[in-house]
Amino acid sequence: MERSGAAGGWVPMCQRVLPAHANHRGELSAGQLLKWMDATACLAAEKHAGVSCVTASMDDIQFEEAARVGQVITIKAKVNRAFKTSMEVGINVTVQDVLTNVEKIVSVAYATYVVKPVGPEKIELEPVKLLSAEDHLEHALATERKRIRLGYQEVFQNLMQESNKEETFEEEHAISADLTHVQSIELVQPPHANHHGNTFGGQIMAWMETVASISASRLCHSYPILKSVSMFKFWGPSVVGDRLVFNAVVNNTFQNSVEVGVRVEAYNCEEWIKNQARHINSAYLIFNSVNDKGELLTFPKIKPITKDSVRRYHGAIARKRIRLARKYMLSAKEDKPYDLWEKSNQAYMSYRNIATLTYLAAKTGWEVTSTLNNIKIWTREDGDVLSFKVEMQVKTASHVAFSLLSDFTYCQQWDKHFLTCKVLQAVSEEDKIYYVTSPPPHMSGHQPRDFVILVSRRQPLEPSEPYIVAVKSVTLTSVPPSSEHCRSEILCAGFQIYSDSSSSCRVYYFNQMTSSLMPYLAAGLTGSLNTIEDTALECIKFLELKGSKC
């Protein structure tokens, strides 16, 4: 059974923060906000699916601002992309002061929803109808975010192995983690469930926040404030009549923050008697706490006693590294210098590489500066950043062009600005790190240049989408700058390849650079402006010659 996709667009929810929604500080309770976010996102999912949907997971959530009593919370949600039976829903939360009319961002989050089948027939979702440039961007990047979700556990396990080697628990005044354990039981009643009798995901999140905050308060002897959540994941449903058992405990502390792990188990009447639990949810909540002056309080150190508490202690360290990498890397709209390549940020750096090129390609304001045969050249200036776009009409199948352009060891065959190019790390089938050297620019007193670059390649999921080859500089501690070369940087470069027919395609090359690199005016990767057309012609010849042999 297929369901027709609804047109893209936000589903809004506006709520005034009342005293009943607030905590002791007069600020909107995080649990209440999570309930509203889940309800709004579910409405957006069901608008697209045309059937009931349930929460599968909610990505890491950061809370940037607090909403106070009397202020207005606006939550907007829309489906970014449908993946057969699941959907990514984007959620934007803002707060507005009605007296000053000032509006601030509270949170930007992404959740995954799945359709709830009606009967034995499987439901496949229709693609989202994209109405704006923003819709197209989020639709493209939703695939990258899904990759991060699927690869999260592998990254986490790698970091756990590193963390386990650093067992130092010698703090004299450390507190046993077991002293922070809190257990609470809730009976799921009709107001807690949807019209099918399944417990609202947002209600479970709210209960988890409550028990986690109590656990954290036992450590800081104050009122904790929820600042972020590391992925709510729902492993199974619960229904009206179930008993939900919440177990919360502090896993670790980090100066001014504390991580609390919460595990949720469900029992029906028969399971309750037999003590047969169903694990339905786990999440990790990060709190801080402030004094009366608004100054951050320092949390005491935790001392893990049991084997399980040691595991949780190291797990919190690994998750913190992932959170820091995610917070830095997912801000793809910002231009940033070299990124240090580490285990904790590999997936996010790959995402950022693809996302930055996607954002650059979607920008407006490109000006045509040259048209020659099958080549067009655009430029775009934004402050001290200059960007190039080169369009090439190529008589080669798009998948062949993609295969050739994504292997940078071929670049020497068509770009004279490559002296050498070798693979440093084959991170995966889709991500490789290269070391490239190029001759000095045609100016006296300059050294040959070298680059350490990450090349990320992606194949399209839909016929209308391009093949992508994204390039950016990274820092490898094993390859420091040398005296023989001037270490140079690529902010953002790469290719988008669109199929025109079975034997032809359009190749778009992009390159973005700051004023420090203006003297070089990169063509391929490193050439000068007056050779862009020549390099593009050589690229076309190379692709068509190689393509004819495939």
Image: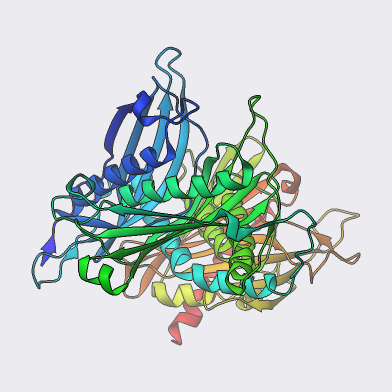
Relative to residue 368, is residue 273 depicted above or below?
A: below
| Image quarter of the N terminus | bottom left
Residue found 13% across the figure and 50% down from its top? 195
Picture quarter containing residue 238?
bottom left
Residue found 62% across the figure and 33% down from its top? 290
Relative to residue 331, is residue 160 depicted above or below?
A: below
Q: Is residue 166 left or right of residue 215?
A: right
**Residue 322 at least partly seen:** no
Relative to residue 12, is residue 204 depicted above or below?
A: below
| Image quarter of the C terminus | bottom left
Q: Is residue 106 left or right of residue 318?
A: left
Could you say which is closer to the camera, residue 372 or residue 274? 274
Residue 293 rendering spot, x and y as whole percentages:
66, 24
Residue 66 rendering spot, x and y as whole percentages:
49, 31
Q: Is residue 160 left or right of residue 438?
A: left
Residue 211 rendering spot, x and y as whole percentages:
45, 49
Could you say which is closer to the camera, residue 168 or residue 415? 168
Picture quarter containing residue 39?
top left
User: Which residue is most to the bottom?
Assistant: 549
Could you say which is closer to the camera, residue 360 or residue 253? 253
Residue found 41% across the figure and 51% down from its top? 208
**Residue 183 at least partly seen:** yes
Residue 197 rendering spot, x and y as whole percentages:
16, 55
Q: Is residue 133 left or right of residue 328?
A: left
Residue found 27% across the figure and 68% down from its top? 272
